Amino acid sequence: MGRGGSAMIKCGWPAGNLISIVIFAIIMATKSDIEIVSLLHTNREAGFKLLVKAYRERLYWHVRKMVVVHDDADDILQNIFIKAWKGLDSFREESQLFTWLYRIAVNESLTFLAEKRKKNIFSANEIEDDLFRHMESDVYFDGDEATRKLQKAILLLPEKQRLVFNMRYFDEIKYEEMSEILQTSVGALKASYHHAVAKLERYLSEED
Amino acid sequence: MKTTKYHFDNESHSGENPFKVPDHYFDKFEDELFRKTFVKHTVGKGAYSRALRPLLYLAAAFALFVLVDKIILHNTASEPAVAENIKMQPDADMLYSTLDEYQVLGLCLDDESLTTNN
């Protein structure tokens, strides 16, 4: 290496670090599902780490909106990735990585809520009431009054409608993708979303 | 309608996310996942077998030692029996000394008849 190079390393440690971070960020941003899957074939662990990096946030927000409590969402997210790791062999490459992971996330969230409901059977309150009460005092909830009302209204929706509504309204998942994830027809999903919207509008107009 | 501020009908607006996470949660999540659960669940069989290998060798060596010891013990097991016979000898002498000649002869005949019957 020439003089200039060594000088650059010497005084450019932080800059070099910054460059490598930027390069890494660019690589991360451009890694598609296909690249992750091909890396999973050649280096399973590295591929999986990349998968976690690529999907942790999207899946977390999806789960969080369903279960509301951060700690629960955190546990569920860990379970999702453990299940994904264990099920990597069963992942069929003709389906998208995104669809497959989302399906695990949906199942995990619904299973969690079903178990919570089972445990709550002798309680006077519905779990949705508890969730809303938690939301009101949650330091990790930062919504204004309108957002609070909307979240309360969403919690009042039937679970499946809530799921569809969250996926469409917040996660912006297309009906076609949603159809693959939830194994439901596009028509049924659209109907479900519109029912949910009608209920929310009714609830919010009554509240106002 | 008041609720239009939520843009439910749209294809272009997404809802604002009011939820937050602890600072650096996503940065830490991966480490936590690999440290707490992923390693436990997945580093799995290979690592465990590698960790257990010395113990398996030790167990095999111990088993071999016990086996060899058993064989040696088995060979020396007859020794206490011999010693026992020697110890028993004075008792037999004492028994014979309490019997007279005819009783001893009778006992011998009984022994002979037993062995011939067998």
Image (cartoon, helix red, strand yellow):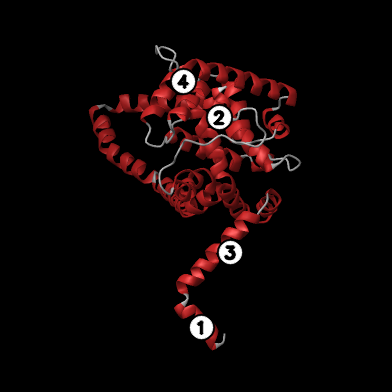
Query: Callout 2, which amino acid?
Result: Lys
Q: Chain of mark 3?
A: A
In front of the other: A10 or B87? A10
Q: Secondary structure at mark 4?
A: helix
> Distance from label 1 to label 2 (Cα)?
58 Å
Query: Callout 1, which amino acid?
Result: Ser
Residue pushed farthest right? Answer: A94
For mark 3, what is the residue?
A23
Q: Chain of mark 2?
A: B
- Residue B51 location (% of width, % of height): 48, 53
> Distance from label 4 to label 2 (Cα)?
24 Å
For mark 2, what is the residue?
B5
Query: Callout 4, which amino acid?
Result: Glu
> Distance from label 3 to label 4 (Cα)?
44 Å
The image shows residue A145, relative to residue A94, as above or below, that is: above
- Residue A136 location (% of width, % of height): 38, 27
Name the residue rendered at 58%, 45% in the picture. A55
| Residue B21 in the figure: left or right of residue A103 | left
